[in-house]
Image (spheres, helix red, strand yellow):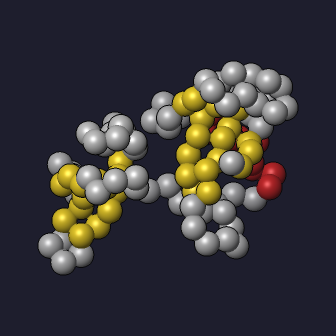
Amino acid sequence: MSTMKFCRECNNILYPKEDKEQKLLLYACRNCDHQEVSENNCVYRNEIHHSVGEQTQVLQDVAADPTLPRTKTVRCSQCNHPEAVFFQAAARGEEGMTLFFVCCNPSCGYRWRD
Protein backbone atom coordinates (compact mmCIF):
# COMPACT_ATOMS: atom_id res chain seq x y z
CA MET A 1 0.00 0.00 0.00
CA SER A 2 1.34 3.44 -0.83
CA THR A 3 1.49 6.23 1.72
CA MET A 4 0.61 9.84 1.10
CA LYS A 5 3.47 12.26 0.59
CA PHE A 6 3.45 15.84 1.80
CA CYS A 7 5.33 18.90 0.59
CA ARG A 8 8.34 19.90 2.70
CA GLU A 9 7.71 23.56 1.87
CA CYS A 10 3.98 24.02 2.56
CA ASN A 11 2.78 20.62 3.88
CA ASN A 12 0.30 20.22 1.01
CA ILE A 13 -0.39 16.78 -0.51
CA LEU A 14 2.04 15.80 -3.29
CA TYR A 15 0.55 14.39 -6.48
CA PRO A 16 2.15 12.07 -9.08
CA LYS A 17 3.53 13.88 -12.13
CA GLU A 18 5.36 12.45 -15.12
CA ASP A 19 8.53 14.10 -16.38
CA LYS A 20 8.34 12.93 -20.01
CA GLU A 21 11.70 14.41 -21.04
CA GLN A 22 13.72 12.61 -18.35
CA LYS A 23 11.29 9.67 -18.17
CA LEU A 24 10.87 10.01 -14.42
CA LEU A 25 7.92 9.82 -12.08
CA LEU A 26 7.82 12.79 -9.74
CA TYR A 27 5.68 13.87 -6.82
CA ALA A 28 4.82 17.54 -7.16
CA CYS A 29 3.07 20.12 -5.01
CA ARG A 30 0.23 22.09 -6.57
CA ASN A 31 0.76 25.07 -4.26
CA CYS A 32 4.49 25.66 -4.68
CA ASP A 33 7.39 24.54 -6.89
CA HIS A 34 8.48 21.59 -4.72
CA GLN A 35 9.02 18.29 -6.60
CA GLU A 36 10.74 15.05 -5.69
CA VAL A 37 11.59 11.92 -7.64
CA SER A 38 9.43 8.93 -6.77
CA GLU A 39 11.10 5.90 -5.20
CA ASN A 40 8.78 3.67 -7.22
CA ASN A 41 7.72 4.05 -10.86
CA CYS A 42 4.28 2.54 -10.18
CA VAL A 43 1.45 4.76 -8.99
CA TYR A 44 -2.06 3.56 -8.20
CA ARG A 45 -4.59 5.43 -10.29
CA ASN A 46 -8.24 4.96 -9.51
CA GLU A 47 -10.41 5.21 -12.61
CA ILE A 48 -13.60 3.68 -11.23
CA HIS A 49 -16.76 4.44 -13.17
CA HIS A 50 -20.04 3.27 -11.66
CA SER A 51 -23.72 3.49 -12.43
CA VAL A 52 -26.05 5.34 -10.07
CA GLY A 53 -27.22 2.08 -8.46
CA GLU A 54 -23.66 1.29 -7.40
CA GLN A 55 -22.93 4.68 -5.82
CA THR A 56 -23.92 3.65 -2.27
CA GLN A 57 -21.24 0.96 -2.04
CA VAL A 58 -18.65 3.19 -3.73
CA LEU A 59 -19.19 5.96 -1.16
CA GLN A 60 -18.89 3.49 1.74
CA ASP A 61 -15.63 2.19 0.24
CA VAL A 62 -14.31 5.75 -0.15
CA ALA A 63 -15.21 6.66 3.45
CA ALA A 64 -13.40 3.56 4.73
CA ASP A 65 -10.28 4.02 2.57
CA PRO A 66 -7.35 4.63 4.95
CA THR A 67 -5.21 6.19 2.21
CA LEU A 68 -7.55 9.16 1.66
CA PRO A 69 -7.10 12.26 3.82
CA ARG A 70 -9.71 13.09 6.46
CA THR A 71 -10.93 16.35 7.89
CA LYS A 72 -12.76 17.25 11.08
CA THR A 73 -13.29 20.89 10.09
CA VAL A 74 -16.02 20.33 7.48
CA ARG A 75 -19.32 18.99 8.87
CA CYS A 76 -21.72 16.93 6.78
CA SER A 77 -24.67 19.04 5.63
CA GLN A 78 -27.01 16.00 5.88
CA CYS A 79 -26.25 14.52 9.33
CA ASN A 80 -23.81 17.08 10.84
CA HIS A 81 -21.16 14.35 11.40
CA PRO A 82 -17.79 16.01 12.16
CA GLU A 83 -15.54 13.78 10.00
CA ALA A 84 -15.31 13.49 6.21
CA VAL A 85 -12.92 12.03 3.65
CA PHE A 86 -11.85 14.38 0.86
CA PHE A 87 -10.31 13.83 -2.54
CA GLN A 88 -9.90 15.55 -5.89
CA ALA A 89 -11.44 14.05 -8.98
CA ALA A 90 -12.59 15.08 -12.42
CA ALA A 91 -16.35 15.53 -12.52
CA ARG A 92 -18.01 14.02 -15.59
CA GLY A 93 -18.45 16.50 -18.38
CA GLU A 94 -16.31 19.14 -16.65
CA GLU A 95 -12.71 20.16 -17.13
CA GLY A 96 -10.29 20.39 -14.23
CA MET A 97 -10.34 18.80 -10.81
CA THR A 98 -13.09 19.20 -8.21
CA LEU A 99 -12.76 18.72 -4.46
CA PHE A 100 -15.24 16.12 -3.15
CA PHE A 101 -16.14 15.22 0.44
CA VAL A 102 -17.73 11.97 1.67
CA CYS A 103 -19.25 11.78 5.16
CA CYS A 104 -17.57 9.15 7.38
CA ASN A 105 -20.79 8.36 9.25
CA PRO A 106 -21.56 4.77 8.08
CA SER A 107 -25.31 5.37 8.16
CA CYS A 108 -25.00 8.54 6.04
CA GLY A 109 -22.19 8.45 3.44
CA TYR A 110 -23.41 11.69 1.84
CA ARG A 111 -21.12 13.12 -0.90
CA TRP A 112 -20.81 16.79 -1.72
CA ARG A 113 -18.59 19.08 -3.77
CA ASP A 114 -16.62 22.05 -2.59
Q: How many marks?
A: 0
- Residue 55: x and y in percent read 74, 48
Residue 50 at least partly seen: yes
| Residue sticking out furthest to the left | 22
- Residue 62: x and y in percent read 60, 39
Q: Please say if 21 is above or below 76.
A: below
| Residue sticking out furthest to the right | 78
Horizontally, is 44 left or right of 52 in the view?
left
Horizontally, is 70 left or right of 45 in the view?
right
- For the point 57% across and 56% down, the residue is 89
- For the point 60% across and 35% down, the residue is 85
**Toward which corner of the image does residue 103 lie, by quadrant?**
top right
Residue 43 at least partly seen: no
- For the point 32% across and 62% down, the residue is 17
**Toward which corner of the image does residue 79 lie, by quadrant?**
top right
| Residue sticking out furthest to the bottom | 21
Q: Please say if 72 is above or below 8.
A: above
Q: Which residue is nearer to you in this view: 102 or 2?
A: 102
- For the point 67% across and 71% down, the residue is 94
Horizontally, is 11 left or right of 19 in the view?
right
Quarter of the image that includes the N terminus: top left
**Toward which corner of the image does residue 56 lie, by quadrant?**
top right
- Residue 59: x and y in percent read 68, 41
Horizontally, is 14 left or right of 78 in the view?
left
- Residue 86: x and y in percent read 58, 40
